[in-house]
Image (spheres, rainbow, N blue to C red):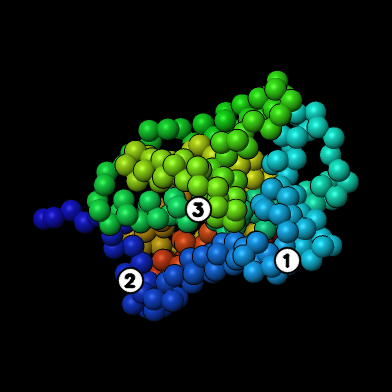
């Protein structure tokens, strides 16, 4: 009997009962969020409509509300740079937002690199490429996070931003900095041929930083109907951090996924035909 590649049939049952849109609802909303945020940044330099000025590192909405990436601010602090009041206020706003909705919501709902790595995962699945899922430890990202801060302290400069694919991709799209596209292609190929979910789930220090916020965030995915689970393994196939599912799905304690690495992407909710998963607060009882 021919062995079925689970990732090639993911969502088929959900599509039959929910329809295509229902089986991809949160994926569609994520793409609208990612592309919509990018479009708002592009309105200024492309059409001279300045709703947002700046980029993901630092921006100003309607010339009034500052937003700053706390990951960049932390590097600036270690580098010994003086931090402007507006930058600190913007960083605090962003920090509070991600403490509520989940730190790694940035990774799945905002970060443009997520589109690149999701595309690599899609083609790897469709082409049946046997990329390893364990070639790089998922703790490596925390070591890179530590190195990025240490380097900032030792050099008195934000060195990581010179090679940060997230910042490079965003600037390249907005300002046409073409030299960074080579790095983006390398990451795409790395995820496609070498390590499944290699960049976002194993190497990216920004994801590591935001996961620390996710440790205490309020919004969570809840496997509250876990008794309906049919062991189809589709949620494991689509989850970029599949190790986080088992404690909630099969454990004897809370059904809420409390792992800090959950991106709240909603794909497990989308593709689960028996509707095991849903969003809830971290305090919701079973």
Judge from the rendering whether residue 263 lies leftward or rightward of residue 274; answer left or right. right
Residue 71 vertical placement versus 65 (above, below):
above
Q: Return the mark for residue 262.
A: none
For label 1, the crowd category at 10 Å Cα-Cα, with few meaning under 14, some 14 to 19 and many 20 or more, is: some
**Residue marked by disc 2:** 13
Which residue occupies the extreme top position in the image? 154
- Whether residue 175 is visible here, answered yes or no, is yes
Kindly identify the residue that appears in the image at 70 percent across and 69 percent down: 49
Q: What x and y, as percent, mark residue 164? A: 57, 39
Q: Earlier in the sequence, mark 2 or mark 1?
A: 2
Q: Nearer the viewer, mark 2 or mark 3?
A: 3
Q: What x and y, as percent, mark residue 279? A: 59, 65
Kindly identify the residue that appears in the image at 73 percent across and 44 percent down: 70
Marks 2 and 1, how far apart in space? 44 Å
Secondary structure of the residue carrying tag 1 is loop
**Residue marked by disc 1:** 50
For label 3, the crowd category at 10 Å Cα-Cα, with few meaning under 14, some 14 to 19 and many 20 or more, is: many
Q: Return the mark for residue 114.
A: 3
User: Which is more toward the observer, 255 or 105?
Assistant: 105
Kindly identify the residue that appears in the image at 60 percent across and 46 percent down: 167
Marks 2 and 3, how far apart in space? 25 Å
Q: What x and y, as percent, mark residue 203? A: 50, 37
- Mark 2 and mark 3 in contact? Answer it, CB < 8 Å: no
């Amino acid at each position: 009997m021919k062995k079925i590649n689970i990732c090639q049939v993911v969502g088929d049952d959900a599509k039959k009962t929910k329809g295509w849109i229902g089986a991809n609802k949160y994926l569609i909303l994520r793409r609208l969020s990612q592309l919509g945020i990018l479009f708002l940044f592009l309105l200024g330099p492309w059409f001279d409509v300045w709703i947002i000025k700046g980029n993901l590192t630092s921006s100003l909405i309607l010339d009034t509300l500052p937003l700053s990436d706390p990951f960049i601010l932390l590097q600036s602090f270690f580098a010994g740079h003086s931090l402007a009041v507006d930058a600190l206020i913007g960083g605090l706003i962003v920090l509070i937002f991600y403490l509520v909705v989940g730190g790694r919501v940035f990774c799945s709902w905002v970060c443009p690199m997520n589109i690149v790595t999701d595309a690599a995962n899609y083609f790897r699945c469709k082409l049946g490429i046997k990329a390893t899922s364990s070639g790089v430890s998922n703790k490596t990202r925390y070591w890179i996070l530590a190195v990025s801060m240490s380097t900032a302290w030792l050099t008195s400069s934000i060195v990581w931003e010179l090679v940060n694919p997230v910042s490079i991709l965003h600037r390249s799209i907005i300002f046409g900095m073409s030299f960074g596209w080579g790095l983006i292609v390398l990451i795409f190929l790395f995820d496609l041929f070498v390590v499944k979910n290699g960049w976002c789930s194993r190497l990216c220090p920004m994801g590591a930083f935001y996961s620390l916020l996710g440790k205490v965030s309020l919004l969570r995915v809840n496997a509250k109907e876990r008794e309906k689970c049919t062991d189809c393994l589709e949620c494991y196939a689509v989850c970029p951090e599949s190790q986080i599912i088992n404690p909630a799905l099969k454990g004897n304690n809370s059904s809420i996924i409390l792992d800090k690495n959950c991106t709240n992407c909603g794909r497990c909710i989308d593709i689960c035909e028996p509707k095991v998963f849903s969003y809830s607060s971290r305090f919701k009882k079973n």
